[in-house]
Image (spheres, helix red, strand yellow):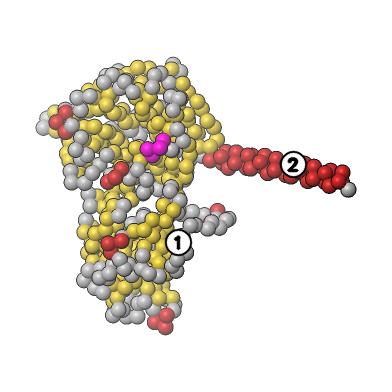
Amino acid sequence: MVFYQISLNKLLRFIGTIIISILIIYSFFNDINNFNNRISKIEVISLPGNQKKIDVGYGDDYWILTENNELYHKSMMLQKFVYKRSDVLDFAVGLDGTVAYIDINNEVYVRSMNADWWYKIADGSYAHQTISICDYKTIFTTNDNFDFIKGVYDYKIDDKLDMYNWEYVDYYYTYYQVSCAFWDHSIWIRGSEEYAYLYKDNYTHIPRTEVELKQVKALSEQYAIGVDYSNNLWELTMGTWTWIRNNVKSATINYNGNIFYIDNTNIVIVCFKRPPDRKQTTIDVNSFNKEVNLPFPNNTGIMKIDVGQGEDFWILTENYKLYHWNAIKRKFIRKAKDYEPIYDFSVGSDGTVIISDYYHDINIRSYIDSWNIIYGHYDNRNISICDLNKIFTTNNYMLFVGGYYKDIYFWDELDRNDYYQISCAFHDKSLWFIGYGHYIYLYVNKYRKFL
């Protein structure tokens, strides 16, 4: 009997070991398959010296900056790194292959028609510190006061050829870094508290992270990469941040969507990815094949949930408190505490967020946790936002009001009738509402509404 029990225990342990081994092997190959779905090839390249930055334009046209401020270019024909300049403070590569750099005297130089010719396009009067370039026509910098500066190429200024006209874009808010997106020339910034924002104008910066980044590089409004201060590399696609790698010193992305990064051993690793669709503005609903339970406090009920893109979603509790899901930290963060009770909120397709505060005024999110009042004339009850450009609201008197953004918001009374709630459709900007009889209607104009 004892012999039988011992043999049975050994058999069970043996079977359990086999099952666990199968699960580990399956998980390993499943992860590899998932990884291969995103990355088709990895290339590892040794570098000279210690590196602190990498940047790239098209294809494999990439450059590196060493810790001792020397600039190198990878010659694909010579298959080696070629020394280019010394005393380089920062540099950037444009979509068209234009290379510009800032020297230690805060002067800006651009590469000319000869591979080793560089000419000065800005003196040190602006105290340039960081640089980003869309193409030869437009260059952005920030300075030691964290101002936002732009240089625009003009073939002829005051009878002088090949000149850049420099001006301050904004010197009121804080700009640590600017990134010009290759695909759509949208502007990303590392702004207040070193979070990443989508720059719309001097007064509108749409938050894209709630984690401090030391570097950001964008391809479009919907797609970017960033490196945080723990040296983690992140990728943003359609509102969802995905962890890529740790131990990353610097990273960039080329026009094709391939990620180049330098690890802590000074090796360049190139991930040749299947690039995201440049024209994609929606996510295939068939791709959602799982449910995820998120850690939300269970001491209160949820009154409303709304979402922009990806995991950019918000929750309003029954005690009128607003929470935002931080996809990188994987937790909910309470927002707009100074505006409580929050009676309603809405999230736009571009990430713009608006709230109806304790006065029922409409406030728009301008920074990570800063809100500016944009509409306080009516007793706003139910609000909906398409994006930054269009906002709709109703009030206790069933007044339907639209707000349209042109540097400031202009508001129009669209109709007075039974409007209990408005909803702006992300895909086509059509308007739906709950109206008479609490039925759902498609709004065409004040005279035509389809049940």
Stretch in magenta: 227-231
Q: How many labels sit on residues?
A: 2
Horizontally, is 178 left or right of 252 in the view? left
Reading the image, the residue beneath label 2 is 18
Q: Which amino acid does the dot numbered 1 rest on? A: Pro
Q: Secondary structure at mark 2?
A: helix
Q: In front here: 418 or 333?
A: 333
Mark 1 and mark 2 in contact? Answer it, CB < 8 Å.
Answer: no
Instruction: From the top left corner, tell me how far across and down residue 279 is, in percent.
Output: 43, 48
Q: Secondary structure at mark 1?
A: loop
Asked if residue 279 can be seen in this view, the reply is no
Main SS type for the magenta part?
Answer: loop
- Of the 4 image quadrants, the one containing the C terminus is bottom left
Q: In front here: 418 or 11?
A: 11
- Which badge, 1 or 2, comes first in the chain's sequence? 2
Q: Residue at x 19, y 24 (%)?
A: 105
Q: In front here: 217 or 446?
A: 217
Reading the image, the residue beneath label 1 is 297
Q: Is residue 228 magenta?
A: yes
